[in-house]
Image (spheres, helix red, strand yellow):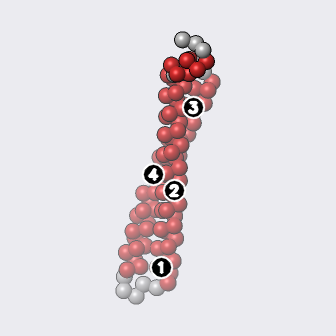
């Protein structure tokens, strides 16, 4: 029962982190597109280029974190399903139980 509870707590934490990441990625994407637009303007200077690079790097870092959170969520889902379904029939056969 405690193991199941810990899995559910981890899923809740993962959901919270995904929501924060989604919001941050949305903001970073807007900043990145604004920086791209500003950099494309005639007479855009070095500062515009640097801002575009910073915004792009921030968005990419948030995207990597998003992918990590999705993988973690998939692992938690599988772990919970395995926990809920109990040992498979193959495991009973291997242990000598029918």
Label 3 and label 4: CA atoms lie apart by 22 Å
Up-down relation of residue 51 to residue 92 (above or below): below
Check disc 2 and report the residue beneath it.
64
Label 4 environment density (alpha carbons within 10 Å; few <14, some 14–19, many ≥20): some
Sequence-first tag of 2 and 4: 4
Q: Position of residue 4 (x, y in %)?
A: 57, 26
Please tell me in which quadrant of the rendered image residue 32 appears.
bottom left
Sequence-first tag of 1 and 2: 1
**Label 3 residue SS:** helix
* Residue at x 41%, y 79% (from the top left corner): 39
Label 3 and label 1: CA atoms lie apart by 44 Å
Q: Position of residue 20 (x, y in %)?
A: 50, 49
Labelled pair 3, 1 in contact (Cβ < 8 Å): no
In front of the other: label 3 or label 1? 3
Check disc 1 and report the residue beneath it.
49
Q: Position of residue 6 (x, y in %)?
A: 60, 30
Residue 8 or residue 42, whichever sits in front? 8
- How many numbered dots are placed on residues in this image? 4
* Residue at x 53%, y 43% (from the top left corner): 72
**Residue 86: in sight, yes or no?**
no
Check disc 4 and report the residue beneath it.
22
In front of the other: label 3 or label 4? 3
Label 3 environment density (alpha carbons within 10 Å; few <14, some 14–19, many ≥20): some
In front of the other: label 2 or label 4? 2
Label 2 environment density (alpha carbons within 10 Å; few <14, some 14–19, many ≥20): few
Labelled pair 3, 4 in contact (Cβ < 8 Å): no
């Amino acid at each position: 029962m405690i193991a199941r509870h810990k899995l559910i707590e981890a899923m809740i934490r993962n959901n919270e982190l995904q929501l924060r990441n989604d919001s941050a990625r949305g903001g970073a994407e807007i900043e990145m597109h604004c920086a791209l637009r500003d950099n494309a303007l005639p007479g855009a200077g070095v500062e515009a280029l640097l801002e575009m690079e910073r915004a792009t790097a921030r968005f990419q870092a948030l995207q990597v974190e998003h992918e990590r959170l999705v993988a973690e969520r998939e692992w938690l889902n599988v772990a919970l399903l395995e926990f809920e379904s109990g040992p498979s029939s193959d495991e009973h056969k291997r242990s000598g139980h029918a």
